[in-house]
Image (spheres, helix red, strand yellow):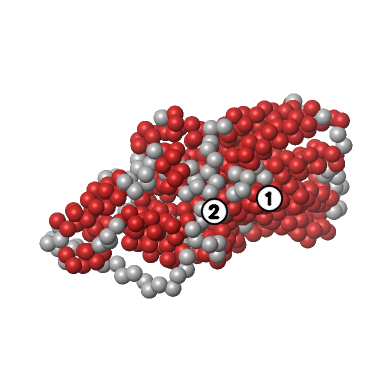
Amino acid sequence: MENGLQQVVTSSDKHALRRIALAEIDNAPLGFSHLRAVVVAGTGFFTDAYDLFSANFITTMIGLAFYQSHVIRTSVDTAIKLSTTAGAVLGQVFFGWLADKLGRKRMYGIELIIIIVGSFGQAISGSGPGLNLLGPLISWRVFMGVGVGGDHPLSSVITSEFATVKWRGALMNSVFAMQGFGNFAAAMVSFICVVAFKGSLVQASNPAHCDTTCQVAADKMWRTIVAFGVFPALCALYFRLTIPETPRYTMDMALDLENAKADTDVYLMRKNPAVAVSDEHFVVVAARQKAAGPKATWKQFWLHFKQWRYGKILLGTAGSWFFIDIAFWGLGLNNSSILRAIGYAGSTNVYYSLYNVAVGNLILSVAGNIPGYWVSVATVDTLGRKPIQMASFIILTVLFCVIGFGYHHLSPHGLFALYVLCQFFSNFGANSTTFIVPGEVFPTRFRSTAHGISAGAGKVGAVIAQALLGPLAKTIGLNHVMEIFAAFMVCGVATTLLIPETKRRSLEELAQTYHGDDELDGVVMENVSNGKESAANQSDQPVI
């Protein structure tokens, strides 16, 4: 038994073993393993954005199909859009906490299963004499939203902990940038559906003239749009369920240095023989975990972050995400309404109205959303996260002021161009960096939880914007709503001052610098040694 135990844990320098494993990840050249991780994680964000932004189209179609006036009420439109966002808040915080408590790998893929089931449930939702469509539809959208929210902390932290230091920001940003393609796909699928059913829609000169044929077409369209979101999630599901645990979690939380090295080899796709795990190994790891005590708890989390030097960073990441999402999702989930308000999709004919809204959203995606994301990918590791985020908030403040105060003096094309610029500088800026920084700046034991809280704060901002934008735009005017957005962007400048620059610094260096955390080089390595001694003392006991 003793010889076997030595074989499992013997190393002349446990510190060196850990440093070597981390160096292999941090200094690995960009390769297929990184591309695979970006595609697997990014497919989830593609699906998330598709499911969220498709609400721009399906609410209008549901109104045509199910309401006597064939126009959906503002309150119902808001409720459908809010439901997914509200579910996302729950998913972000809950999955963020579980990923720190149970491990990244054990949770990854579950959120996609939730999205798949939720999307399918929506697509087959119906109504009857005793049940309105709205009840089951909103319930399924809340359920789906939990999965959408859970994707944020998991994908960010997994990408961060596997990424090379030099290009970590670009890799994380590439995952997040898949939202742009998801937005585009939602508009494209909607466009295809509208064109496919042109014969059923074009005869309706306005929504009030939408006859039975028009209603059936609208019902088929929204269900098709929702159902399409299942396919990309299915494509990524297997790869998420089979991804290895991140070496940092395996070392820092599970205290399993030997398997961490194996996980590194699996991720980097090295052709090494599988490592045989002996009973002695389980004894050693269990002893290490016992020596370390329980994993980080909520009590430890709050004791840590209630100290201003640590708490200000969480306030900076959560506050910045809150303020940018007020504007980004306030606009993004109302693209169709805003396009109509500025005169870009002003036709009353049902077909041409839906057609123009789909084309307008495609233009917004191609001209503003997608370029903004990928310019951020190209520059985030050279310009840095903090300068990009600061510049973004300042530029958006100016743009919202121009739109708000000059609203009645600008042509529809001028307003549309400014709106495209708002989309571009949101994504080439705070909308991207607020996703990246929380996945880097916190220590391993709190990283996913803190990211989930930051992301949840963002979605709370999205809920507030969505709940207020519709009613406020009708009572005080869209121009004044833009002025309010400008004020929130100024607040974002203030919260950006609270976050540090994280570019091209290892996660361990960031944890040590900003959280006084040696990330296992001291405390946990002592637990590793204590675990070895404890296991050796039990070496004459039978292994069960």
Q: Give the Cα separation between the discs numbered 1 and 2.
A: 17 Å
Q: Residue at x 70, y 54 (%)?
A: 184
Q: Residue, x 68% and y 50% (percent of image)?
A: 375
Q: Identify the mark at residue 166; answer none if there is no mark.
A: 2
x 51%, y 53%: residue: 165
Dot 1: few (<14), some (14–19), or many (≥20) neighbours within 10 Å?
A: some
| Residue lying furthest left | 540
Q: Number of callouts in the render?
A: 2
Is residue 125 something that shows in the picture? no
Question: Sequence-wise, which precedes: disc 1 or disc 2?
Answer: 2
Residue 243 against residue 334 in the figure, above or below = below
Whether residue 538 appears in this view of the structure is yes
Q: From the image, which quarter does the N terminus lie in?
A: bottom left
Q: Amino acid at mark 1?
A: Val
Mark 2 neighbour density, 10 Å: few (under 14) some (14–19) many (20 or more): some
Which residue position holds label 1?
A: 375
Position of residue 464 measured from the top left corner of the image (x, y, whole percent): 61, 33
Query: In the current view of this chain or complex, which residue is farthest to the top?
Result: 476
Secondary structure state at the residue bearing disc 2: loop
At which x and y percent is residue 529? 24, 52
Residue 128 is labelled as: none
Q: Nearer the viewer, residue 360 or 437?
A: 437
Looking at the picture, does residue 87 appear above or below residue 283? Answer: above
| Figure quadrant of residue 490 | top right
